[in-house]
Image (spheres, rainbow, N blue to C red):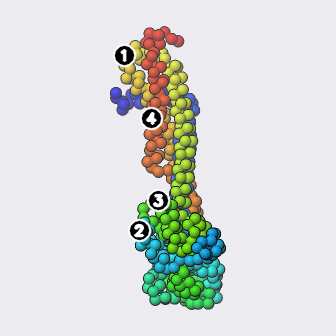
Amino acid sequence: MRLFDRDIWGEAFHSLRTNRKRSIATAFGIFWGILMLVILMSLSQGFSNGMRKQLGGISSNTTMLYCSTTSKPYKGFPTDRWWSLSVSDIANLQKRFPEIETIASIQQGSWNTPVSYGTKSTTAPLYSAWTSYDQIVYSTILAGRRLNESDEQQRRRNCTIGEEVSQKLFASHEEALGKVINIDGSYYTVVGVLKGKSKGMNINGSEEQKVRIPYTILSASLGQSNEVYHFLYSLHGDGKDSKAINDRIKAYIRSTHDIAPDDESAIGEFNISEFFTAQNSMMWGVNVFVWFIGIGTLLSGIIGISNIMLVSVKERTREIGIRRALGAQRKDIIRLILLESGMLSLLAGLVGLLLGVGIMSIVAQITASMESEMLVNPLIPFGTAIGALLFIIIGGVVGGLLPLKKALEIRSIEAIREE
């Protein structure tokens, strides 16, 4: 079958041009279907990218545990008892549970700590954490460095400040480096300016707004040098078994701190991996819905092509009969009918695809200039776009099978007699 015969292509184009209005009306269903599919898939991709960006500042297999009051009496201890872990407890957890990849204790100071430099002042949440915290909660260094083990061990009066704090106190982030600022009556040297990588999910507030000092200094000032009330850890792997592992960790903590085995409220938990799983499931559902709507629209367009080709075959009964009488073989009729339906699908699908990509490219530029956090790079993946176009072409060819069957049933003598 000579698929690339110029005469055959010319005949197909001539047939489409001869019935231009009908061809355009039929092609519009395909065009509109793939246009909507491209736009919806692009928006879905953009929201998915935005969600990943907002949640990308923290390890996806992370859990935060915190001490709360007991709700049940146990071993002579009353309810509503405050309790705490020790620094050695936290360190031993990683040894006892090899599933834990990284663990870090957190100390939270005042949420409205006065911070000033010269005549400028502001308030900011004050906190400290083990240096391993930075391997779990990610941040970007805008200037300088992070606090390190030397700062902790030597109790250096150094600090890092968030981007927004820096903007309120200094003309630039670089200017902030090396400056001594007043933090609630104590003086610290700024060694770094940080920005969090996640705005959608944070541990104890956004990094841009916070001030961090060495853990050894803050815990001592709070009188909690060996007390831990908040800590978080990340697990090896993708965190699919995080719930079972977390339950084992909490059971161990209860057994070593005289807490009733069934006292669920004594240990607070925020399982971030479950949150990530829920978000992924939601986006999967959205994508399925988008594909369902898009493919449904495309199928209606393909059915429209099949119907219009049936009408075309009916109108061209005499022409097809003459072709058969002059020696046209079955394969020639097959090629002509399928080429027309496939070409109509291809042209309509290609125009819809290009227009959809063009529209969403403009939307992507606008959202990028606005630094949108919700809609990031809303462009349909290349493979998905090509797959949709192939689906259209194949669907158009399949849609031409019924008209083809009718065309092949035409007998030369009867067709020539028909007026």
Residue 199, percent from left and from top: 57, 67
> Label 4: which residue?
394
66 in relation to 123, above or below: above
237 in relation to 300, above or below: below
Dot 4 alpha-carbon crowd within 10 angstroms: few under 14, some 14 to 19, many 20 or more: some
Residue type at mark 1?
Answer: Gly
Kindly report the distance in space between the C-alpha atoms of the residues bearing marks 2 and 1: 79 Å
Nearest to N terminus: mark 1 or mark 3: 3
Q: Residue shown at 54%/81% (left/top)?
A: 227
Regarding residue 210, the answer to whether it shows in the image is: no
Q: Where, by quadrant of the figure, is residue 264 drawn?
A: bottom right
Residue type at mark 2?
Answer: Pro
SS at badge 2: loop
Kindly report the distance in space between the C-alpha atoms of the residues bearing marks 4 and 3: 42 Å
> Label 3: which residue?
241
Asked if residue 210 lies left or right of residue 416, the reply is right
Residue type at mark 3?
Answer: Asp
Kindly report the distance in space between the C-alpha atoms of the residues bearing marks 1 and 3: 70 Å
SS at badge 1: loop
Name the foreground residue: 232 vs 244.
Answer: 244
Which of the two discs, 2 and 1, sits closer to the camera? Answer: 2
Nearest to N terminus: mark 4 or mark 3: 3
Dot 1 alpha-carbon crowd within 10 angstroms: few under 14, some 14 to 19, many 20 or more: few
> Label 2: which residue?
98
Q: Residue shown at 64%/69% (left/top)?
A: 71
Dot 3 alpha-carbon crowd within 10 angstroms: few under 14, some 14 to 19, many 20 or more: some
> Label 1: which residue?
327
Which of the two discs, 4 and 1, sits closer to the camera? Answer: 4
